[in-house]
Image (spheres, grey):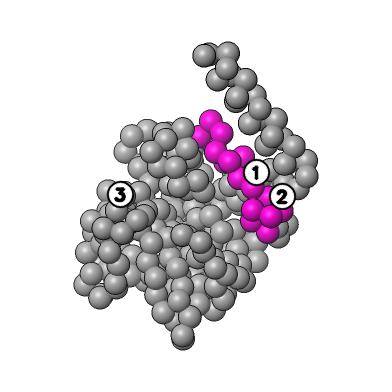
Amino acid sequence: MVKKPISRETNEENLRYFTNLLSGCEHFVFFGTLLGLVRDNRLIDGDDDVDIYVNSAERDIVIDIFKKNKIKFNLDDPPNNTPHILQIKRLVNGEVGLIDFYFYNAGKDPNNIWEIWNFSGHYKNPNSAIKISRNLIFPIEPIFFQGAQIFLPAKAKDICVFLYGESWDKPLAKNREYKTKIINNKPRVFVGKIGKIERLIIKLLGYLRILKIG
């Protein structure tokens, strides 16, 4: 799916609406939604969606909540036909907003949570999963945002560094001024022309490794 910029107001309304629905489930904001709240105290204007992490053990509960609230979605359509993500569209004042619910695994590792969809969407490749220390996530921190209770990871700034690198506090255009790859189950951010060269070197080294093995 090619995502389009969405107004800050629509994203913020959807954040308030869905976090209220999920108040009884283990969840917290992540990716660009978290970045905006930490860096700007608001969501990023023109971001293409709202990002929420949800414990995979509660996926069926989340689906049931959405059905009871008459939220339309089709589990047979990609990417909702995988157990890793649920994409919901919701109309707000004439604008369609997109909300991504990423389901993380909190039961396989005593020290980390794992989430396989993330930036890449390469859910069939276990090397594309991201591993996040539980100490960065728990206990989840509630804050009040525009009258709604929103949940953040315990060490929200550290998570921003983990996801977006040391330049996390500088607004950069995704896929134009920076790109992210998953390397050794951790996000690695490549910024600007130097980052592009670094990506090419890593790609070349990967090809050489394959040739050597072959």
Q: In this view, does 133 lie above or below 69?
A: above
Q: Which disc is residue 14 wearing?
A: none
Residue that protrudes farthest toward the bottom in the picture: 93
Q: Which disc is residue 83 wearing?
A: 3
Residue tagged by mark 1? 189
The picture places residue 192, in percent across and down from the top left corner, at: 75, 48
Q: What element carries label 2?
A: loop
At label 2, counting other C-alpha atoms closer than 10 Å, the crowd grade (few under 14, some 14-19, many 20 or more) is few
Q: State left or right for residue 66 relative to residue 175.
A: left
Distance of mark 2 from mark 1, alpha carbons? Answer: 9 Å
Distance of mark 1 from mark 3, alpha carbons? Answer: 27 Å
**Do callouts 2 and 1 mark residues in contact (Cβ within 8 Å)?**
yes
Disc 1 marks a residue whose amino acid type is Val
Disc 2 marks a residue whose amino acid type is Ser
Disc 3 marks a residue whose amino acid type is Pro
Q: Earlier in the sequence, mark 1 or mark 3?
A: 3
Q: Is residue 56 visible?
A: yes
In this rendered view, identify the residue nearer to me: 59 or 71: 71
In front of the other: label 2 or label 3? 3
Q: In this view, does 146 lie above or below 156?
A: below
